[in-house]
Each structure stands twice: as structure tokens, then as C-alpha cells.
């Protein structure tokens, strides 16, 4: 039996490459604690994680020098974990990508045992899509797609698309079932 879904944590990472097992690292992580019933963002989170180089700076526009400025990383990550604790599911677009990086680099608390829903594979959008890229979903849902490939804007795109869905709670129940059936694919 599925539990009722109240809050979800919409998560996105920006990374220095595609494979954490080949040395790519999270350079930025963001999250929105989002209430499904009221379609409201309850909290936001975004932080850089220190890195020496960013070979994909032309894609995510993150200068590695910014990541070396002083800021409370540990406190930020503890807050991120608390947000995960307040959520019923972790939500990400192409969740297997974000999940593998988070599990590899941030083995902290609740997020390691959380259930994930992928907005690319598990969630059924109420619009016809030819491709399941986040940009395509935003275009089909009438959400401007600006400042892409930064973690917080990408989370906000997903929340803005959710805001436009009348039967969001029902769609999440279906997505949760789909995620349960495909959960082994993430590991």
C-alpha cells in the first residue's frame, strides 16, 4: 500500500562530468521542498561544492573559483538532509544521474534510504512529448526555460510545471507506483 504523498524534495545536481566513478564530482546541488496538495515551494536550498576544475564549465557556467569561496558547506548539507527527512519522495529529472552522484559523494542521512521518482521516466506529464528532456517538458507546459543547467533553476522548472497540473496528486500516486516497480534500475 502506498503512503499518501505530502511533500517531495525536488533535487538537481550540476557536475564536472558524467561518471562519479571516473572522477566527476558534484559542483552544485539544489533542492526545493514542495507540497503536492497545495502546489507550494516550502523551502529552497542551493550550494556549491568545492572543486579544482570544471571541464564542463561551458555547459553549466560554473567557475570552479566560485566553489572555493568561503561558505558553510557542512551546515548547508545538514540542512539538505533535513529537507530530505521532511519529504516523502526525492524527485529529479533523470533521477538515476543525480542519485548516483549524491550516493557517491554525499552519503548522509535520509537521502540514502529515500524513495525516488524520476520526472523523465516515472512521471506521466499531461502533455504530448516527443522527447522527455526538461526543456521539452517546460515548452509543452508553457514554462519559460531560462538559465538552464544550473541546479536551482532546474528544480524551479520542475516545480513550475507541477504548479500547472490539475490532477497532480493523482499523477504522483501513479508515479510512485512506477518508481517502486523500477527502483532496482537506479542502483
Image (tube, rainbow, N blue to C red):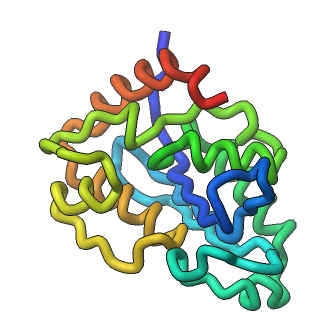
Residue 31, by quadrant, is: bottom right
Using residue 145 as the reference point, say whether residue 99 is left or right of it. Answer: right
Where is residue 166, by image quadrant?
Answer: top left
Question: Is 68 positioned to the left or the right of 61 in the image?
Answer: right
At a point 54% along the width and 76% down the height, the residue shown is 60
Q: How many marks?
A: 0
- Relative side of 15 to 145, left or right: right
Residue toward you, 52 or 142: 52
x, y percentage for residue 140?
16, 56
Query: x%, y% of residue 40?
Result: 39, 57
Residue at the outermost top position: 1
Q: Which part of the image, by quadrant, shows the C terminus?
A: top right
Q: Quadrant of residue 156?
A: bottom left
Name the side, left or right, on which 63 lies relative to 3.
right
Q: Residue at x 65, y 62 (%)?
A: 17
- The residue drawn where x is 83% and y is 68% is 75
Above or below residue 97? Residue 14 is below
Residue sitting at the far left = 128
* Residue drawn at point x = 55 percent, y = 54 percent: 11
- The percent coordinates of residue 78 (x first, y second) are 80, 58
Residue 171's place in the image compared with 135, above or below, is above
Is 15 placed above or below 19 here?
A: below
Residue closer to the observer: 55 or 75 = 55
The percent position of residue 133, horizontal first and vertical second, equals: 33, 53
Amino acid at each position: 500500500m502506498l503512503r499518501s504523498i505530502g511533500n517531495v524534495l525536488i533535487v538537481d545536481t550540476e557536475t564536472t562530468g558524467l561518471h562519479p566513478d571516473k572522477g566527476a564530482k558534484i559542483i552544485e546541488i539544489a533542492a526545493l521542498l514542495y507540497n503536492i496538495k497545495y502546489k507550494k515551494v516550502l523551502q529552497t536550498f542551493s550550494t556549491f561544492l568545492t572543486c579544482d576544475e570544471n571541464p564542463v564549465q561551458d555547459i553549466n557556467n560554473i567557475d570552479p573559483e566560485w566553489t572555493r569561496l568561503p561558505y558553510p558547506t557542512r551546515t548547508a548539507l545538514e540542512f539538505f538532509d533535513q529537507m530530505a527527512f521532511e519529504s516523502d519522495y526525492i524527485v529529479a529529472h533523470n533521477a538515476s544521474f543525480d542519485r548516483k552522484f549524491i550516493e557517491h559523494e554525499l552519503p548522509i542521512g535520509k537521502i540514502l534510504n529515500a524513495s525516488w521518482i524520476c520526472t523523465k521516466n516515472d512521471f506521466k506529464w499531461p502533455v504530448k512529448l516527443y522527447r522527455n528532456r526538461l526543456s521539452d517538458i517546460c515548452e509543452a507546459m508553457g514554462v519559460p526555460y531560462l538559465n538552464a543547467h544550473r541546479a536551482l533553476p532546474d528544480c524551479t522548472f520542475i516545480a513550475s510545471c507541477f504548479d500547472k497540473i490539475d490532477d497532480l496528486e493523482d499523477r504522483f500516486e501513479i508515479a510512485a507506483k512506477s518508481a517502486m516497480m523500477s527502483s532496482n534500475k537506479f542502483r
